[in-house]
Image: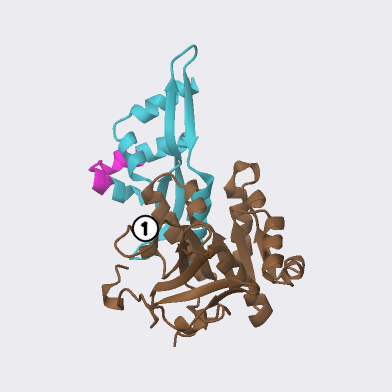
Chain colours: A brown, B cyan
Amino acid sequence: MIELMKTGIDGLDDILNGGIVKNSTTLISGNPGAGKSLLGLQYIYNGVELFDEKGIYLTFEENESDLADAAASIGFENWDEYVDNGDIKVYDKQVLLRENDFSSALEILLDDLDDDQYERLVLDSLTMFQLFFENEREKRTYLLKFTDILRENDLTTLMTNEQGTVFPETDIGLENFLTDGNIFLLQTPTDSGVNRYVWVAKMRKQNIDTDIFPMEISQGGIKVHQNASAFSMMTEEESPI
Amino acid sequence: MASVDLLQTLGNKYSAEILEATDEPRSAQELSDELEIPIATCYRRIDELTEHNLLELHDNILSDDRRRIKVYRRNVDAIQVEFDEELTLDVEERSEVTNKLDEAWRTLSES
């Protein structure tokens, strides 16, 4: 019996057939502005708000106060309270890059993981994390080791990944093969703004709906709509991942 | 002179090959087999390199026949030699980040 962890995001758990596999690592890829960080934020927030599961949010991209502002503006009213009482532990870019040295923060993080009190983790972004490694081989090796460490410590992880346009036929980074699941966030400009879509391309051990679903970002966060979009482009067998 | 000593150690036959191969932890026996180094020489080189902190004892792992085996890992990424004015060696140690992840990952299998 595979245990699942709900994201608590409207519609997303349904297309995931219940949630994300527990103790797995899922890559959230997309362009800047596609909603990757928000998805991570919501996943961590919902963990505490809906499921009483503590989370760790690692960000190389933002300060703790930027994060709090983002949470407040999207309607995660209790974010500050959860951070204050320790249900959500934030490592922001100031902490992670203190003394220009990620290793001291890594040490504290590894201690926290050992603690067993956290169940969810977000790394925003994997792209930045990988800058600490010197070559492709190191990047792969340490991504695998890091995901092993997270799994063994019973953490269910989302990692964001900067990626150019992600439609079939384009390059697919090796990261996609090394993680347990891949979710792509897509956006296309329209006259009035953007259309947003989510595509769950891969989930190890899980039957998923690999159609592309429309999603929206509004007050309360991300919502995924159930009606599969008209341009469902590939079947599971054809997926390159 | 410490720098000359270190260079001497580096220059010994097989030293560079051992450092190259110990990106991941390796035992003396493995190094001897892979690099075709006589085992006694292999142990001697490992001792010299460890003495100069270029190589470190990484772990005592349990072999298939339940013996403890020492595995060694290189401690440096690069060494730069300067001859200007005074001979200096700039030893660039391996990244702390990778070390910490290696360490944490290694303890997973023990617990």
Question: Viewer-proximal residue, A36 or A220?
Answer: A220
Left or right position of A179 against A171: right
Image coords of residue B67 (percent x, y): 38, 61
Question: Viewer-proximal residue, A23 or A187?
Answer: A187
Seen as rendered, the residue at the extreme front is A191
Q: Is residue B59 visible?
A: yes
- Give me the residue at 61% from left, 42% from top: A100
Q: Quadrant of the C terminus of chain A?
A: bottom left
Image coords of residue A177 (percent x, y): 36, 64
User: Which residue position holds label 1?
Assistant: A173
- Helix, strand or loop at label 1? It is loop
Q: Quadrant of the N terminus of chain A?
A: bottom left
Question: Viewer-proximal residue, B1 or A214?
Answer: A214
What amino acid is at disc 1?
Answer: Gly
Q: Magenta region: which residues?
A: B32-44
On screen, A209 above or below A174? Answer: below
